[in-house]
Image: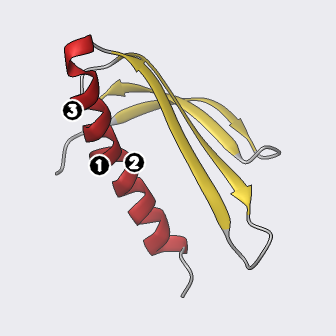
Amino acid sequence: DGARIRDKLLSLSDYEYKCTYTNLEGPIELSDHLATIRLFPVTEGNRCFVEWTAEFDCPSDEANQISESMGEKMFQVGFDALKKCYGQR
């Protein structure tokens, strides 16, 4: 939706195919945010499995809404962009 998102890279491992970052600015107010993206090879074909996780603190009455929003507006959009760029053709 054009919202500005700023993240800070905390770690990057070429060996583990993993990066960890924290959110500095975005449309969702979070605290103690820590996210990890990790790639795992798939044994058949030229593919991989992407695992994207996030931990954060937020008011308990907003946890479900924030989790759903993060899944739909951040993770799914990211997965769709990866698939468009690197997906099987």
Q: Which residue is mark 1?
A: 72
Is residue 54 toward the left or the right of residue 65 in the image? right
Q: Secondary structure at mark 3?
A: loop
At x 43%, y 32%, the residue is: 7
- Image quarter for residue 16? top right
Amino acid carrying label 1: it is: Glu
Q: Residue at x 41, y 19 (%)?
A: 56
- Relative placement, left or right, of 47 versus 54 is right
Measuring from the top left, give residue 60's x and y in whole percent. 27, 12
* Residue farthest toward the left in the current orientation of the protein: 1
**Is 32 displayed left or right of 87 in the figure?**
left
**Which quadrant would residue 86 be assigned to in this image?**
bottom right
> Circle 2 sits in a helix, a strand or a loop, which is it?
helix
Labels 3 and 1: the sequence-earlier one: 3
Q: Which circle marks residue 62 in the picture?
A: none
Residue 7 versus residue 32 in the image, above or below: below
CB atoms of marks 3 and 2 within 8 Å: no
Q: Identify the element where label 1 is drawn.
A: helix
In front: label 3 or label 1: 1
Label number found at residue 27: 3
Q: Which part of the image, by quadrant, shows the C terminus?
A: bottom right
Type of amino acid under label 2: Phe
Q: Circle 2 sits on which residue?
A: 75
User: Residue 39 location in percent, x, y?
Assistant: 67, 52
Residues under labels 3 and 2: Cα distance?
14 Å
Q: Amino acid at mark 3?
A: Pro
Instruction: Tell me how far mark 3 sits from mark 1, CA to CA.
Output: 13 Å
Is 54 on the left-hand or right-hand side of 88?
A: left
Q: Are marks 1 and 2 in contact (CB under 8 Å)?
A: yes
Q: Circle 2: is it few (<14), some (14-19), or many (20+) Cα within 10 Å? A: some
Q: How many marks?
A: 3
Q: Residue furthest bottom?
A: 89
